[in-house]
Image: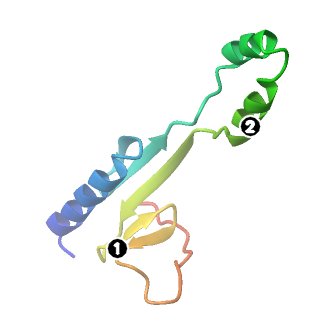
């Protein structure tokens, strides 16, 4: 695959993953996507728990259990034009029944 085609495929992937988080270039044919985690306003929930005599503790515990940590993902385009997301083929779709797990190559 030509370099211009690889770059075009990478630009398409950047358009898709740019919606999910912050994009940082990590090489000529790869980039990183950092996705922010969710946070819980602990001070506000403490005050609400005090004001509601502990009833807000249920909501607080649910929010804490659903809290997500920030994550960092690597997206790259290989020499054949396949787009890889964290070591799994994203496009073109794999020929088998599911995603193919292959260790990512460092370019």
Q: Mark 2 points at which residue?
A: 62
Which quadrant, please, contains the N terminus? bottom left
Q: What percent of the width, then of the height, locates residue 88?
A: 50, 70
Q: Do the residues bearing badges 2 and 1 touch, measured as CB atoms within 8 Å? A: no
Q: Residue at horizontal 55%, vertical 69%?
A: 103
Of 80 and 84, nearer the camera is 84
Of 68 and 26, nearer the camera is 68
Q: Residue 24 carries which label?
A: none
Q: What percent of the width, then of the height, locates residue 89?
A: 44, 73
Colour mode of the rendering: rainbow
Q: Name the residue under label 1.
A: 82
| Placement of 76 over or under 62, stated as above or below | below
Write down the quadrant of residue 25 in the picture.
top left
The answer to whether residue 28 is visible is no
Nearer mark to the viewer, of 2 and 1: 2
Q: Residue at horizontal 69%, vertical 34%?
A: 63
Q: Residue at horizontal 68%, vertical 41%?
A: 66
> Dot 1 surroundings within 10 Å: few (below 14), some, or many (20 or more)?
many
Of 9 and 64, nearer the camera is 64
Residue lying furthest bottom? 96
Q: What percent of the width, then of the height, locates residue 4?
A: 15, 64
| Placement of 5 over or under 65, stated as above or below | below
């Amino acid at each position: 695959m030509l370099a211009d085609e690889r770059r075009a495929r990478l630009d398409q992937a950047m358009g898709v993953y740019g919606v999910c988080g912050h994009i940082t270039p990590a090489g000529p044919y790869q980039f990183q996507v950092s996705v922010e985690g969710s946070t819980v306003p602990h001070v506000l929930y403490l005050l609400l728990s005090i004001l509601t005599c502990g009833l807000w503790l249920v909501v607080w515990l649910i929010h804490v259990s659903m809290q997500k940590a920030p994550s960092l993902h690597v997206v790259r385009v290989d020499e054949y034009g396949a787009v890889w997301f964290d070591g799994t083929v994203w496009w073109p779709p794999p020929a088998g029944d599911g995603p193919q797990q292959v260790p990512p190559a460092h370019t």
